[in-house]
Every structure is written in structure tokens, then in C-alpha cells.
Amino acid sequence: MRSLVPLVLVSMALAGPARAEQDLLLGADMNTPAMTRAEMSRADIEALIAKADGKPLDLSDKALSGLNLKGANLRTARLNKANLRGADLSGANLEQAWLLKADLSGAKLVDAKMFGITAREANFSGADLSRAQPIGDFKGANMSGATLVDLRGGADIKNQSMGLMRAVFTSVNLSGANLKGANLGRSRLEYANLTDADLTDVVLMGSDLSGANLTGATVAGADFKSVDVSGTRLLSLKGQDKAKDWASRVNADRAITQASN
């Protein structure tokens, strides 16, 4: 059975012409004050939270770059397309928040609570998500060069009253990302780009890596028990001889282990 709310949202398609919206940014100067200055202060946001009276806070499309939001309670907040570049969200509560196409490049999300989050196509490039709990939908997100050390994205099979809740990193760009010690057990990583990523000691047990690209990735100490590698590119891996349960991969005969001519 698939995950339920908000991970029922895992199977929901995004509405609207995404391509057209992306084209609107072509040629835009991302260094102008309009792009780099926050429209609101932390005090402004806290005041809105207080007035919300438990209802979802809507900060969609707001420019909040560089803002100090450490420990902020943004649970269920709507932050779709918000500019949060370089913002400090360390320890923030983002459970059940919406971050569709939000820009969090270079942001700090250390220890952030992200259970039930929906962040499809969001930009986390260069962000620090160390020890964060991204149990939610990140399909199509950009996490290139991000730090995800000790990430807690694995499914907790002891607490699944609402179905299998886990990190959904389908088609996520994780190229060059640091995932040392991350827990991605039973996670969805189909077609993820993990080229040159550091997967040292990562728990991948039971995850779906079908169609993913691990070319040049470091896999020493990574747990591959029952990992589906159908169509997975396993080329030029580093530390493969030190990977755990390498022989127990699922569909190992369908993995791509030799470069095509």
C-alpha cells in the first residue's frame, strides 16, 4: 500500500505548464535586490504564524533569501516557489509544508523536521540538510552538491500506521552530493542522478535504485541488501569491494556495469 497524506501526494501530478513557468526566468538577473533581499523579517513571519490560528501559512512566491529562520515553526506552510536561498532553517519544523519549485540553494536545513513534506522540483543545490528528516516527496528536485550527512530519510517499518512513509527521491539530481552515513533504507531513488556522490556508509537496504546513475560514486560501507538495481548505471564505482551485501542486490543481472561503445 502506498503512503497516505501527505504522501498520497507522492502519486499526485503537478498542475500547470511547468516548462512555461521555468522559461519566465530565462535571462533574469538573479543578483538584483528583488532577487536577493527578503521581503519580510523573521518577526513578520512570526506575527503571521500567530494570526494563522492553526491554519496553513501561505508564503508562496515570497522572497525570503538569507533570512534567519532557525527553529521556526513552518509546519503545513505554503512556500511554493518561495525564494529561500541562503536562508537558515536549521532545526525548523517543515512537517507537511509545501515547497513546490522553491529555491533553497545554499540554505541551511540542519536537523530540520521534514516529515510529510512536498518539495517537488525544489532547488536544494549546495544546501546543508545534515541530520534532516526528509520523509516526503522530492521528485525532480535539485540536490547537486548538497550536504546530506547522516540524513534520516529511511522508512520506519515499526511506525507505519499510514502506510510506507519514506523519502521519495525519484529523478532527483544528487550529483556530487555528500550522503555519508545517511539512512535511505526502503527509499525511492528511481532515475536519481548520483554521479560522483559520496555514499560512504549509506543505508540503502530495500531501496529502489532502478534506472539511477551511480557513475563515479563512492560506495564503501554502503548497504546494498535487497536494493533494486534494474537498469542502474554502476560504472567506475569507488570502494565497491567494501560495500555491504553487494551480492544480495535485486535484478543485479539487469544493472549496467560496462560502458557502451
Image: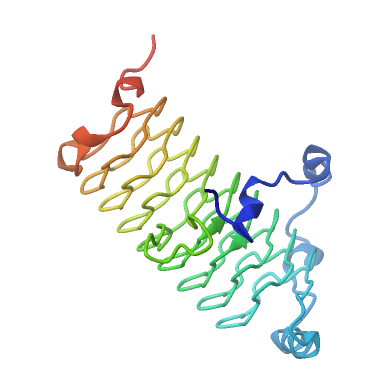
- Decide if residue 188 is on the left or right side of residue 142: left
Whether residue 92 is situated above or below residue 261 in the rendered picture: below
Residue 29, x across and y down, in percent = 78, 53
Q: Is residue 143 left or right of residue 33?
A: left
| In the depicted structure, whether residue 173 falls above or below residue 100 | above
Left or right: residue 214 compared with residue 244: right
Above or below residue 230? Residue 109 is: below
x 54%, y 67%: residue: 114
Identity of the residue drawn at 43% across and 49% down: 187
Q: Where is residue 80 in the image (x, y as percent from the top left)?
A: 74, 61
Check the image and name the residue furthest to the top: 261
In the drawing, does residue 157 fall left or right of residue 220? right
Image coordinates of residue 117 in percent, x first then y, are: 60, 63
In which image quadrant can residue 217 be found? top left
Residue at point 40%, 57% (across, down): 154
Residue 28 percent across, percent down from the top left: 80, 49
Q: Residue 206 appears in which quarter of the rendering?
A: top left
Residue 84 can be seen in this image: yes
Using the rendered view, name the quadrant where residue 83 is placed: bottom right
